[in-house]
Image: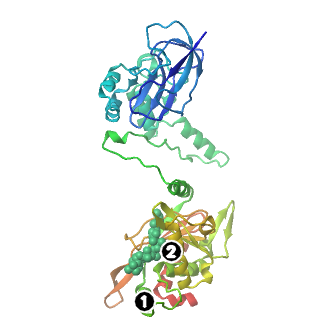
Amino acid sequence: MSLIEIKVPDIGDFKDVAVIEIMVKPGDTIRLEQSLITVESDKAAMEIPSSSTGVLKELKIKVGDKVNVGDLLALLEGVAPVSAAAPATAVAPTAPTAVRPESVEGLAQASTGSARTEQRAAVPAHNPTSAPVGLPHASPSVRKFARELGVPLNEVKGSGLKGRITDTDVQAFSRSVMSGAVQTRAAEAQIKSAGAGSGAEGAGLGLLPWPKGDFSKFGPVERRDMSRIKKIGGANLHRNWVMIPHVTNHDDCDITDLEAFRVAINKENEKSGKGPNDAGVKVTLLAFLIKACVAALKKFPDFNASIDGEQIVLKQYFHIAFAADTPNGLMVPVIKDADKKGVLQISQEMSELAKKARDGKLSPAEMSGACFTISSLGGIGGRYFTPIINAPEVAILGVCKSTIEPVWDGKAFQPRLLLPLSLSWDHRVIDGAAAARFNVYLGQILGDFRRVLL
Ligand code: CAO
């Protein structure tokens, strides 16, 4: 008996739509126009019907595949066609594709053939008498709604005809989870596994899946792929944010004299054409901050540490990373052995590393081995922020723009240049008192840099 190929019919301008649901399985007798699969683009969910009758021999796609017009979906073993339908192998230009009502607008926007769109939209939605294979009894629109809310449909009790799950059931389930009256099975499992062995109760994140939505329903949007740096950096930041118990101490320190010294050094540079070093390097505040942090790390070794299992590794070297803003995202080059280098050498290395970062030419070695990171937004602005620790480090210093502020000297207010500091630290290793002392000490050094010599 000949096999009939069932292909993706004309679905307008949609390309690479994802298969999100398969409603049939090999051995099933398929009726003409019976829905076989649901596909979803960023604008609409559509059911793809069969263009022939027969017994399903083989599915050629699986959930997660991306399909386009004309792609082979399934092979049917022929039963005499019920109607004079177009040959199944041909792409049926007007094949009825059930589009859930709220998607019609999106489909119309995306399709150039509005007549075809209207025709499709006018076709009543697929209304199966039994639930699709392995899926709860619910229409595609309800399933999509549940996905958007992160509701596991197989845990929802349907109140509709023959136990069909409705929008209202999904909403009610979501509300009961939010109020704590119900816990999803996934959350229960996480709680159990997190509590296993520790006797802890109430642990586990129990997070709902990320909400998915059709933003274009609310206004025009543009989609961009994330850069590789953002993808990798984002995953690291997420892990660090979730796994490290962060606390951030904010403080101000007086850099009036330091800034005057820095400006004077740079003026000397300009006048001589070379400055105090042969390279004629511009001295930056960040270079002084790196030196000051080395001194503070020496005084408070817990900040120059990493957690390794049940041990704390205290480092006896001083490699300081700094965050560099680049067109492709955040890069974090490292000044190695900052304790053995002067401010001029650090300034020069920083400017070279920052340029390499912007040009995308940093080597992995130039970004590894850091003990502590400084993130400076001083050249841009702002007062304070909460920097995320760069694991496996245990602390990070954020710096914002210095401003002249009135400071009381016991007799009068004096205009002083204050630098806002934000120190984030890992509470598993560091305590609040130590963090406050670290900031105070850092402020003392930046207030009078001669202290570095002590
Ligand atoms: N307060 C006031 N002014 C400051 C300052 C501060 N804290 N820090 C720097 N400035 C000034 C500098 O004096 C300089 O002014 P002039 O041009 O008049 O001399 C100007 O801001 C620019 O500084 P810079 O860029 O030359 O040097 P930098 O050391 O501040 O910064 C670098 C170098 C690589 C850190 C920076 O280019 C950068 O990428 N910063 C962003 C870091 C970032 O994105 N952090 C966030 C991470 S979390 O997402």
* SS type, badge 1: helix
Residue 436 - label: 2
The reply to whether residue 148 is visible in this rendering is yes
Q: Residue at x 57, y 81 (%)?
A: 295
Compared with residue 20, is residue 160 higher up or lower down, i.e. above or below?
A: above
Q: Rounded to the nearest whole Å, what is the CA distance between mark 2 and mark 1?
A: 39 Å
Q: Quadrant of ligand 1?
A: bottom left
Residue 234 placement (x, y as % from top left): 51, 55
Residue 133 image-quadrant placement? top right
* SS type, badge 2: helix
Residue 331 - label: none
Residue 317 image-quadrant placement? bottom right
Residue bearing mark 1: 270
Residue 74 placement (x, y as % from top left): 55, 21
Residue 371 placement (x, y as % from top left): 61, 71
**N-terminal label among 2 and 1:** 1
| Amino acid type at mark 1 | Glu
Q: Residue at x 37, y 47 (%)?
A: 222
Q: How many marks?
A: 2
Compared with residue 183, is residue 343 higher up or lower down, i.e. above or below?
A: below
The reply to whether residue 441 is visible in this rendering is no
**Display coloring:** rainbow
Residue 42 placement (x, y as % from top left): 41, 38
Tag nearer the camera, 2 or 1: 1
Number of residues whose C-alpha sits closer than 10 Å to that of mark 1, classed few (under 14), some (14–19) or many (20 or more):
some
Compared with residue 430, is residue 224 higher up or lower down, i.e. above or below?
A: above
Could you say which is closer to the camera, residue 264 or residue 259? 264
| Amino acid type at mark 2 | Ala
Q: Are marks 2 and 1 in contact (CB under 8 Å)?
A: no
Could you say which is closer to the camera, residue 216 or residue 241? 216
Q: Report the quarter where the C terminus lies.
A: bottom right
